[in-house]
Amino acid sequence: MLIDDELYVASRKYLIDYGMRQLNGLGADQICKVCIQNGGSCCRACSYLVDGVGCLNRNTSCTSWLCGYLKLLFYKAGLIQEWNTFWKEVPGIDFRKDYTPPLVKMTKHLEVKHRRELGEALANDINMKISKEKDNIDFIVLASELDELIDEIGFAGTSDIASQLIKRLNYLIKDFHAFKHILKSIDNGS
Ligand code: SF4
Ligand code: SF4
């Protein structure tokens, strides 16, 4: 949630740690785990990735970037706009590296959410989907479709086309039963 627009100074490290807390708070790490096990990792072929160690250069760029599945997670959690608005304030975001200065002036705040069950449920659904398929192609294609569609929904705002796009999104995730169940239970306040 955006709390206020007062200026504050955050270190680059704080921003990265903060981003990781938010991602882990929604259980995004569980989705990445399934993705990596099935050859979909966005870190593939990155020179900063070391086998058995992980990333040697965690930066603001890779922390803020959401693939299609993580976009779905943030969108359905109602946090995608706040997430994007927050990272738009961070300078120096680049591909697989950043030029973010050690200290950054910020106005946006986000409240870290603790809803790991959302990411865990989505990870289970994705795992189930992959286990029914003969390869990981559909899983990779779906990530790309979700990526584009959720951006389009954001651009469509409240126009008529938005409801068509949302229908299409709900169709694409029709088999994600565990994820939808958790979303429903959150909506019902349970
Ligand atoms: S592509 Fe998405 S789910 Fe896969 S490792 Fe990257 S961020 Fe995680
Ligand atoms: S720099 Fe980014 S893409 Fe490369 S290993 Fe680290 S997190 Fe992955």
Image: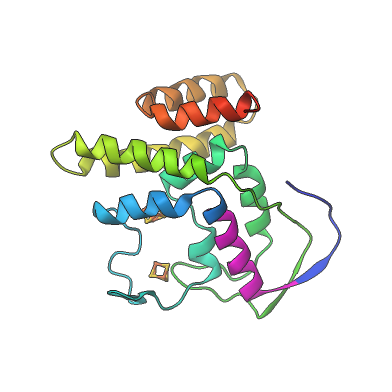
Residue 154, quarter of picture: top right
Image quarter where ligand 1 lies: bottom left
Q: Would you say residue 18 sits in the magenta stretch?
A: yes
**Residue at 32% across, 51% down:** 35
Residue 39, quarter of picture: bottom left
Is 1 or 189 nearer to us in this picture? 189
**Residue at 67% across, 47% down:** 82
Q: Position of residue 137 (x, y in %)?
A: 21, 42
**Residue at 55% across, 43% down:** 74
Q: Residue furthest right?
A: 6
When the figure is inspected, residue 76 is found, relative to residue 119, above or below; the finding is: above
Q: Is residue 71 left or right of residue 111?
A: left
Q: How many marks?
A: 0
Q: Position of residue 65 (x, y in %)?
A: 50, 57
Q: Is residue 60 left or right of residue 179?
A: right
Q: Residue furthest front?
A: 190
Is most of the magenta stretch helix, strand or loop? helix
Q: Would you say residue 64 sits in the magenta stretch?
A: no
Please state the extent of the stretch shown in magenta in the rendering. Answer: 10-23
When the figure is inspected, residue 183 is found, relative to residue 110, above or below; the finding is: above
Q: Quadrant of the C terminus?
A: top right
**Residue at 29% across, 74% down:** 52
Q: Is residue 82 left or right of residue 60?
A: right
